[in-house]
Image (cartoon, rainbow, N blue to C red):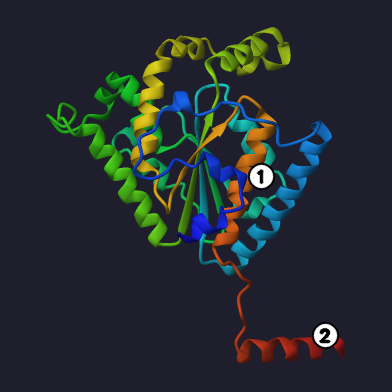
Amino acid sequence: MGCHDAAMKNSYARRFLVRPGRKLKLARCPTDVPKLYRNEKDAEEQLARQVARTSELQDVLYASDRHSLLLIFQAMDAAGKDGAIKHVLSGVNPLGCQVSSFKQPSAEELDHDFLWRTTLRLPERGRIGIFNRSYYEEVLVVRVHPQYLAAQRLPEGAVEARDFWEGRLRSIRDHEAHLHRNGTRILKFFLHVSHEEQRKRFLDRIDHPDKNWKFNLGDVEERGYWDDYMRAYEQALAATSTQDSPWYVIPADDKKNARLLISQAMNATLESMGLAYPKLDRKRLAELKAARKLLAD
């Protein structure tokens, strides 16, 4: 059992791990599970306790300055990524946390390999980085809509190669393994919302004026590719979930449940990293003692 598995042993979130080397069928993965809370107040109190623990762990992560944590969020539209990020990290010191959202790539980004633009946003040591969508879009939306590859001007014959998509997935595995070896722990969350729940949330965005800004007609058009997206997600998650950089398929029909599960997995990972405040050598201790004496006089 690896350190991550050991940390997750008593965590309910571990039930939703994508086991490395196994095939994945999202139709068999729940989008809803029994509530982890008794009522709304209990959900808020539980999350508040978990967020407080995250804040404590993040403080030690920042002070030790040897590791970083990267959280990757992927989902179908209206699955609750933005809300999950907002609530789960609400108590973290902003100096030690950075959120990056990735939308349609710019002309400059298209002139580089598909991992370039996200590499520029990786968290420094001591910090938690959040990717709201990520390089995984290149094996998800681009796989569902391969016409987008034309703008990337790849070498002739590259796209037609039989192992093109496997090559991209292999690049991601290698990239994440490199990051892990250099101190960046990676947690990846797929917020798994049902087709019907997504429909309800789209209608809610249409029916409530204060939510109209969230609605995009293109999101409804993408529902027509639902099965294609599920296949792309199955292949991507199964190919890139490893012991060091695991994927979680988080049931997301209940937003409060999803937030509790994400917070639980994140804290378990931080606790598994063996974080500790830096130990001071004799010279540094002597300096502190001398400084205290000056301030006390």
Residue drawn at x 71%, y 49% as measured from the top left: 50
| Residue type marked 1 | Leu
Q: Which residue is mark 2?
A: 295
The quarter holding residue 268 reads bottom right
> Is residue 105 visible to us here?
no
| Label 2, residues with CA under 10 Å away: few <14, some 14-19, many ≥20 | few
The quarter holding residue 46 reads top right
| Label 1, residues with CA under 10 Å away: few <14, some 14-19, many ≥20 | many
> Is residue 238 visible to us here?
yes
Question: From the viewer's perspective, is residue 111 above or below residue 183?
Answer: above
Q: Secondary structure at mark 1?
A: loop
* Percent of width and height locating residue 211: 68, 16
Residue drawn at x 37%, y 37% as measured from the top left: 238
The quarter holding residue 275 reads bottom right
Residue drawn at x 35%, y 35% as measured from the top left: 23
Q: Where's the C terminus, which quadrant?
A: bottom right
Left or right of 205 in this view: 191? left
Looking at this view, is 97 or 245 the one in front?
245
Point out the frontmost of discs 1 and 2: 1
Residue drawn at x 19%, y 28% as measured from the top left: 159
In three-dimensional space, the C-alpha distance between marks 1 and 2, rounded to whole angstroms, equals 37 Å
* Percent of width and height locating residue 146: 28, 21
* Percent of width and height locating residue 33: 63, 30
* Percent of width and height locating residue 97: 60, 50
Looking at this view, is 57 or 146 the one in front?
57
Q: Are marks 1 and 2 in contact (CB under 8 Å)?
A: no
Q: Which residue is mark 1?
A: 89
Q: Secondary structure at mark 2?
A: helix
